[in-house]
Amino acid sequence: MDLKTLQTLLSQTENEHIEFKEAKTAYSFEKLVEYTIALGE
């Protein structure tokens, strides 16, 4: 993914293709990797 595509996604509101999540507590890098992989499956 290039920077322009990322900026386009971040400028959108949530919809059926994109959902923003907030880490309310400390979020380890390992947990982030696991979450990202799960979303991709």
Image (spheres, rainbow, N blue to C red):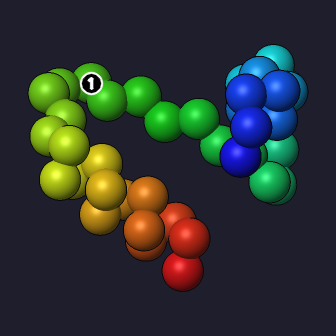
Say what amino acid the circle numbered 1 marks: Lys
Q: Which residue is mark 1?
A: 24
Q: Nearer the viewer, residue 39 or 33?
A: 33
- Percent x, y of residue 33: 31, 56
Closer to us: 22 or 33? 33
Q: Is residue 16 above or below residue 5?
A: below
Q: Is residue 14 visible?
A: no
Q: Residue at x 43, y 71 (%)?
A: 38
Secondary structure type for disc 1? loop
The structure residue drawn at horizontal position 27% and vertical position 24%, both measured from the top left corner, is 24
Q: Position of residue 34 (x, y in %)?
A: 29, 63
Q: State whether residue 38 appears in this view.
A: yes
Residue 17, by quadrant, is bottom right
In the image, taking residue 4 as reference, residue 3 lies left or right, namely left
The single residue placed furthest to the bottom in the displayed view is: 41
Q: Position of residue 31 (x, y in %)?
A: 21, 53
Left or right? Give the position of 41 relative to 26: right
- 35 or 1: which is nearer to us? 1
Residue visible at 59% across and 35% down? 20
Residue under the point 15% across and 40% down: 28
Q: Which residue in the rendered view is the most extreme toward the front?
A: 2
Q: Total label count?
A: 1
Asked whether, in this view, residue 36 is left or right of residue 7, the answer is left
Q: Is residue 32 above or below residue 21?
A: below
Image quadrant holding the C terminus, namely bottom right
Quarter assignment of residue 8 = top right
Callout 1: 10 Å neighbours few (<14), some, many (20+)? Answer: few
In this picture, is 26 found above or below 33?
Answer: above
Q: Position of residue 6 (x, y in %)?
A: 73, 32
